[in-house]
Image (cartoon, rainbow, N blue to C red):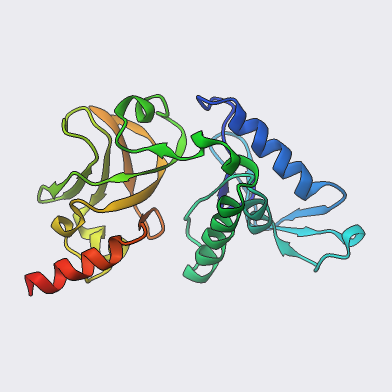
Amino acid sequence: MPEGIVLPSRLASDAALPRAAESAAWAVLDTCLVGIGSAHVDRHGRLSGPGWLACPARNAPAEEDLATALLQAGAGYAQPTGQDRQCLTQRLAAETQARTARRGIWAEPSAVAPAGDEEAMAIRAGLFTVAEGRVLAAGGTRDRIFLNFGSSWRQDFTAMMEREDFATIMGDSLEPAMLRGTLVQVRGVVRAEGGPAIMLRRPGEIALLAGAQARAARGKRGGE
C-alpha cells in the first residue's frame, strides 16, 4: 500500500466504490513495475511506504510517484500523512483532477459523504471518509474545537481537533467562530463519539470550499 492514498474498503456501504477503485488501479498498474521504499508493516499486516511506478512499455517517465498516479486515475482518496506540504499539494491536486473528470470512484455519488446526514456518516464508522457540508455550529472547550454539521450536537456528525492544533491546521487568520456557516470538506476515519466524528490532526484534513475563504476573510476583517 503506497503512502498518501487510501483505497475504498470492501466494507464500504456502496459496493460500487471498491469495484471502481480496483478497476482504476489495474488500469494504472497493468504492465508497470512497482517499487516500495522504506516500507513498514502496518497494524493490518500490510506493507506500507512511499512507492514509485515505472511503465517502460508505455514510454512513461521513470519512477512516477505511485500514489499520485493512482489518485489521478480515481483509485482512491488523498491521505495527509507526514509528507511535506509540496507532496500533499500535488496529491490533493491529482485527486481534484480525477474528481473533475469523474474518473474511477468519482463517477459514484457515494464517493463523497454528506456531512449533514448523521445516518450516512454513522454507517461509515471505522472507514476513511471524505465528507462535505456546512458547519452549523463551531465552538469548543479548553482543550478541543468542535465543528457540528447538524442541529443535535450529541448525535450529528462532528469534526474535532485539539485546540493547540487549530492554528497549524487552519492557519493563523481564522478563529473557530468564523467557520460557522461555511462549507467545508473533511477527511479521515469516522469514529463514534456519541455521534459520528472525525478527529482532525494535520493540515489537508479540512479544506474550505468555494467561496468559504472569502467569507472567512470578511469575518476576520469585521472582527478587527
Residue at horizontal 56 percent and vertical 66 percent from the top? 90
Q: Is residue 155 above or below residue 27?
A: above
Q: How many marks?
A: 0
Q: In which quarter of the image is residue 50?
A: bottom right
Position in image of residue 56 (x %, y %): 89, 61
In screen coordinates, is 129 left or right of 221? right
In screen coordinates, is 220 left or right of 82? left
Q: In this view, does 17 lie above or below 98?
A: above
Position in image of residue 38 (x %, y %): 65, 57
Position in image of residue 60 (x %, y %): 83, 65
Residue at horizontal 50 percent and vertical 34 percent from the top? 110
Position in image of residue 129 (x %, y %): 45, 39
Q: In this view, does 210 lie above or below 221?
A: above
Report the front residue among 119 and 85.
119
Report the front residue among 210 and 200.
210
The C terminus sits in image quarter: bottom left
Residue at horizontal 7 percent and vertical 70 percent from the top? 223
The N terminus sits in image quarter: top right
Q: Quadrant of residue 179?
A: bottom left
Q: In which quarter of the image is residue 4?
A: bottom right
In screen coordinates, is 160 left or right of 57? left
Q: Is residue 98 above or below residue 199?
A: below
